[in-house]
């Protein structure tokens, strides 16, 4: 079922083919359709909460030059023109957000200092010993059983500490008082061990962060090339230009896939060798201890 806006667009297209139609009427109808489109491009992304009002204004300005193309090339089958424009608005809003994120990364890389970038981009926040509000709770039945085992079995306590150290990337200074109490350890001693663990795994962490940066760069390039290819196809550009961009896009997608696979295959920065060195036990003991404590934890968690 066609809408009034769809009928206006079809009438305008008919007037374009009819050389005897009034130029003034055609211009008036075109202006009316354009205003309807502008209204959709501004209000729809805000209504569905993809963009805020300020971003919607920028999107509207960016789409101004494409209104004639949208109106004149529209072909009505089952989708009304206003729904078609909403779909375009949704897709362009997504592209706008990706472009905005890419521009922010470029701004960060050009303007910000290395120290600022580390604070913004690196997920591993350096440990700083300033207690904060913590939402962890040790009153559950599983925690009570674990605390009982830790107090009665030094071997289990050592294994549990090794498991904590293995998760050092997820820890913050506010976790230390809770864990120290849970493990019946001195807070400063636990903080020292955690800091040493973090330091010993720093090289692997730096390499992982470099790989994340490479992956992000390939992702940005891939999204830019996808958009460029879409625009070239829409304007019926020369086949040689389209082929050139397609080759670049395929190469970029391959590099992005390789970076993802390498990231997925990277082991935890805290290896069993590091844990063995920190807790003064053989690596084989750490291997068997990790296997044993994971079985115990799985059994406790899965218990009815």
Image (spheres, rainbow, N blue to C red):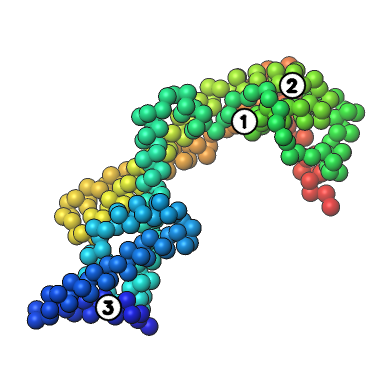
* Badge nearest the viewer, 3 or 1: 3
Where residue 75 appears, as percent x and y from the top left, is 27, 74
Label at residue 169: 1
Mark 2 packing: few (<14 Cα in 10 Å), some, or many (20+)?
some
Q: Quadrant of the N terminus?
A: bottom left
Mark 1 packing: few (<14 Cα in 10 Å), some, or many (20+)?
many
Judge whether 252 appears above or below 284 on screen: below
- Earlier in the chain: of badge 3 and badge 1, it is 3
Where residue 293 appears, as percent x and y from the top left, is 77, 35
User: Which residue was labeled with disc 2?
Assistant: 190
Judge whether 200 appears above or below 74 on screen: above
Whole-number angstrom distance, CA of label 3 to CA of label 1? 60 Å
Q: Secondary structure at mark 3?
A: helix
Residue at horizontal 29 percent and vertical 57 percent from the top? 63
User: Which residue was labeled with disc 3?
Assistant: 8
- Earlier in the chain: of badge 2 and badge 3, it is 3
Q: Secondary structure at mark 2?
A: helix
């Amino acid at each position: 079922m066609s809408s009034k806006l769809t009928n206006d667009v079809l009438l305008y297209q008919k007037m374009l083919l009819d050389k005897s139609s009034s130029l003034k009427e055609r211009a008036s109808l075109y202006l009316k359709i354009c205003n309807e489109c502008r209204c959709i491009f501004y209000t729809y992304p805000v209504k569905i909460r993809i963009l805020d009002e300020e971003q919607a204004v920028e999107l509207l300005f960016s789409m101004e030059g494409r209104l004639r193309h949208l109106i004149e090339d529209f072909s009505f089958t089952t989708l009304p023109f206003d729904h078609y424009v909403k779909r375009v608005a949704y897709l362009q809003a997504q592209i706008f957000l990706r472009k905005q994120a890419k521009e922010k990364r470029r701004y960060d890389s050009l303007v910000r200092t290395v120290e600022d970038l580390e604070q913004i981009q690196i997920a591993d926040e350096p440990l700083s010993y300033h207690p904060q509000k913590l939402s962890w709770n040790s009153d559950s039945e599983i925690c009570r059983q674990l605390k009982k085992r830790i107090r009665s079995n030094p071997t289990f306590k050592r294994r549990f500490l090794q498991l904590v150290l293995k998760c050092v990337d997820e820890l913050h200074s506010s976790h230390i008082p809770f864990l120290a109490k849970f493990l019946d350890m001195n807070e400063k001693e636990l903080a020292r061990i955690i800091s040493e663990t973090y330091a010993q795994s720093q090289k692997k962490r730096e390499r992982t962060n470099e790989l994340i940066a490479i992956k992000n760069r390939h992702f940005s390039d891939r999204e830019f090339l996808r958009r460029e290819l879409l625009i070239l196809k829409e304007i019926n550009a020369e086949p040689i230009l389209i082929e050139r961009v397609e080759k670049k896009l395929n190469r970029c997608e391959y590099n992005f896939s390789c970076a993802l696979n390498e990231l997925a295959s990277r082991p935890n920065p805290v290896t069993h060798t590091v844990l063995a060195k920190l807790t003064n036990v053989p690596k084989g003991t750490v291997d068997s201890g990790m296997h044993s404590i994971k079985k115990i934890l799985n059994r406790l968690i899965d218990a009815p």
